[in-house]
Amino acid sequence: MGPPELLWPLSGPPIASRERGRTYLSGATKLKKKKAEEEAQKRQQGALDKYFAPQSEQADSALTGTNEEIAADAQISEVAPESSSVVADISDPGNWPTTLNDRQRCDIIEKGPVRRRDLNYPRNKEGRCFTERYYNRFLCNGENTDREWLVYSINKDAVYCFCCKLFSDKVMTTSKLNRDGLSDWKHLGDKLSDHEKSGNHLKHFVQWKELKLRLSVSKTIDEDAQKELNDLKNYWRNVLERLFAITHYLASRNLSF
């Protein structure tokens, strides 16, 4: 007996001739159909997985992003103190930043040029060092004037012009007294004499004195305003104390107000 004859219906897989006339599918056909549906579902599921990452990967990605943000915030917090406008030791011009803001400039002027006397000044290779006699200017007529603008930096072992260091343009200036400090002790006297006669030095000296005067006047005005405020507080405090005493007296005797 030969193999069963295969019939080709309008749709679906071919069926054996023995299933002709049946109103239901055989068990083998059902298994094949179920297997084909499962494989189609797996293919579709794999296609969707290409567009959606697993939840574990999403969680790891979120944690990674959070950790990166925390690390960035930590770096910012560590760098932030460096942008502070406070100078460590404003008495030494060698510690001043290259560019001063208005707040720093006012703080330095209020403190004024600081000179530490009787220091053991280091000597250079030629055996020369700074001496405190350069703080004074000796005129031809024998007069002695104070170079109040001259300041020695212990940190840099150099001298600076206080007012020019504060107000000069660090890009345009060529004098070491305004920028990096001067430590040429052999020619220091001549260079100081030339500097104090220059137009830029005189301009910066006037700027220094004018700002110092404005700061002192502003400080005086603030002190006067504070005194007036304190007097006003004391006045109303006395008024309230008297009203309380009167109220207490009338209430203790059951008198009307």
Image: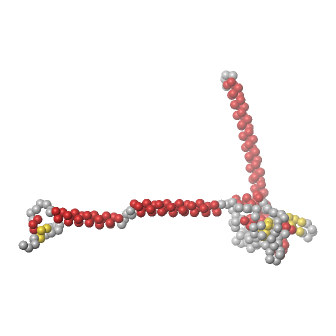
* Quarter assignment of residue 24: bottom left
Q: How many marks?
A: 0
In the current view of this chain or complex, which residue is farthest to the top? Answer: 254
- Identity of the residue drawn at 75% across and 65% down: 93
Looking at the image, the residue that sits furthest to the bottom is 126
Image coordinates of residue 200 in percent, x first then y, are 77, 69
Residue at the left extreme, as displayed: 1
- The answer to which of 15 and 202 lies nearer the viewer is 15
Left or right of 141: which side holds 88? left
Q: Quadrant of the C terminus?
A: top right
Q: Is residue 177 visible?
A: no
Please give left or right for residue 207 compared with residue 2 in the image. Answer: right
x and y percentages locating residue 8 in the rendered image: 13, 69
Residue at 68% across / 24% down in the picture?
252
Question: In the image shown, does 21 or 203 lie closer to the viewer?
Answer: 21
Residue 236: where, in percent of width, then height? 71, 37
Q: Is residue 116 above or below residue 257?
A: below
Residue 198, percent across and down?
A: 80, 71
Instruction: Quadrant for residue 216, please give it.
Output: bottom right
Question: In which quadrant of the rendered image does the N terminus lie?
Answer: bottom left
Out of 13 and 32, give the one closest to the viewer. Answer: 32
* Image side of residue 75 versus residue 101, left or right: left
In the figure, is residue 252 to the left or right of 20?
right
Q: Image point 81% across, 73% down: which residue?
A: 123
Give the quarter of the image for residue 75. bottom right
